[in-house]
Amino acid sequence: MAAVRAGFRRLFSISAFSPPPPAAAVPAAEPSPNLFISGLSKRTTSEGLREAFSKFGQVVQARVVTDRVSGYSKGFGFVRYATVEEAAEGIKGMDGKFLDGWVIFAEYARPRPPPQGQPQPQTPPPPPQMSESPSGYQ
């Protein structure tokens, strides 16, 4: 009976369970002209984002991601510069700064990972060759 009780104690004690593994550090994205901007206010617009980042180089595109229903910012967006050097200046100039009353964070954008559970698109097979007879039968 004592052995069973000790087994239950060991099974249900906190020390019997190992802690979860530490979270893997996400590697930094490679430098590119695309920036990911987080921490945006609900009031921030794509034009406001473009204006703020254009001080550091030629902005090709600035887009605040918005909610489909409300139309308000989801709190993040993307800025694309003409060159990687301008993008680096944009990060230096705007990371940790205030925009529309909120502290924003700028970093290089990571490429979108492939969708989970879906097979990768492959090239379609070549069309079947037509036979010499017009009806397709020989």
Image (cartoon, rainbow, N blue to C red):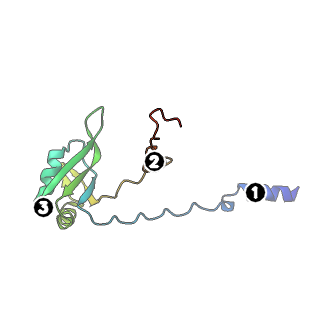
How far apart are labels 2 and 1 at the CA level? 62 Å
Disc nearer the start of the sequence (3/2): 3
Give the crowd class for mark 3: few <14, some 14-19, many >=20 residues within 10 Å: some
Q: Nearer the viewer, mark 2 or mark 1?
A: 2
Q: Position of residue 53 (x, y in %)?
A: 15, 56
Horizontal side, residue 34 vs residue 112: left or right: left
8 or 105, nearer to the observer: 105
Q: Nearer the viewer, mark 3 or mark 2?
A: 2
How far apart are labels 3 and 2 at the CA level? 46 Å
117 or 68, nearer to the observer: 117
Residue that label 1 marks:
9
Using the rendered view, name the quadrant where residue 66 is placed.
Answer: top left
Disc nearer the start of the sequence (1/3): 1
Return the mark for residue 57.
3
Q: Which amino acid type is shown beneath numbered disc 1?
A: Arg
Q: Which amino acid type is shown beneath numbered disc 3?
A: Gly
Q: Position of residue 5 (x, y in %)?
A: 82, 55
Residue that label 2 marks:
125
